Each structure stands twice: as structure tokens, then as C-alpha cells.
Amino acid sequence: MTCVDGRRYVGRYHETTPRGVLLHDVAAFEQSGGMAFEEWIGRQWKFGVHVAHKHVVVPTDEIRELARFSELIDR
């Protein structure tokens, strides 16, 4: 998931509620970490999602793109 402010999350989609989209077992990409997104997402794919948050609710109006994890990887 990509948010309008640049945040990116990888997690298990659970449902869309009036509060927003609920994800479980979520990894969050931090732009300031020095690692490029492509490298980070590749590591998530190779080694498994590094869970940073058990649950995240992202308000629907803050979501720019919602995609399957497999669609983000160049295999």
C-alpha cells in the first residue's frame, strides 16, 4: 500500500471498514532509512515480511495505491 504522503506498508489485507483499510502483520517502509524502496521490498519478498506493527488501519482517503505484494516484485 502506498499512501499519499509517501508512507508504504506491506501486510495482510483484512477488510475495509468505515475507519479505513485494516492490515495485519505489517512492515513499514521508512524513506529516511537510506535503503531504496526496491531493495527493501526485495528483502521483504526474499526473507519474509519483517512485522513492525501487528495491526494498522489506514484511512481510505490517505491511500494512493493498494496492490498485491506479488505485483510489486520483479521476479
Image (spheres, grey):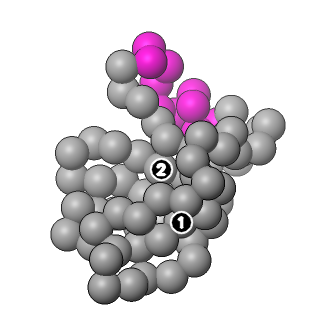
In which quadrant of the rendered image does the N terminus lie? Answer: bottom left
Q: Nearer the viewer, residue 32 or 41?
A: 32
Helix, strand or loop at mark 2: strand
Residue ID at (46%, 24%): 36
Q: Amino acid at mark 2?
A: Tyr
Residue ID at (77%, 44%): 48
Residue ID at (57%, 28%): 39
The part of the image, by quadrant, that contains residue 65 is bottom left
Q: Main secondary structure of the magenta part?
A: helix
Q: Nearer the viewer, residue 47 or 23?
A: 23
The part of the image, by quadrant, that contains residue 50 is top right
Residue contact between numbered discs 2 and 1, judged by CB atoms under 8 Å: yes
Q: Amino acid at mark 1?
A: Leu
In the image, residue 44 above or below residue 35: below
In the rendered image, the residue lying farthest to the top is: 34
Neighbor class of circle 1 (other Cα within 10 Å; few <14, some 14-19, many 20+) is many
Residue 53 visible somewhere in the drawing: yes
Count of all numbered marks drawn on residues in the image: 2
Return the mark for residue 9.
2
- Indicate the position of residue 14 as horizontal and vertical percent values: 57, 77
First to last magenta residue range: 33-42
- Indicate the position of residue 5 as horizontal and vertical percent values: 21, 45
Q: Earlier in the sequence, mark 2 or mark 1?
A: 2
Return the mark for residue 35.
none
* Residue 36 painted magenta: yes
Q: Which residue is mark 1?
A: 23
In the image, residue 11 above or below residue 31: below
- Relative horizontal placement of residue 47, taking residue 6 as reference (left or right): right
Helix, strand or loop at mark 1: strand
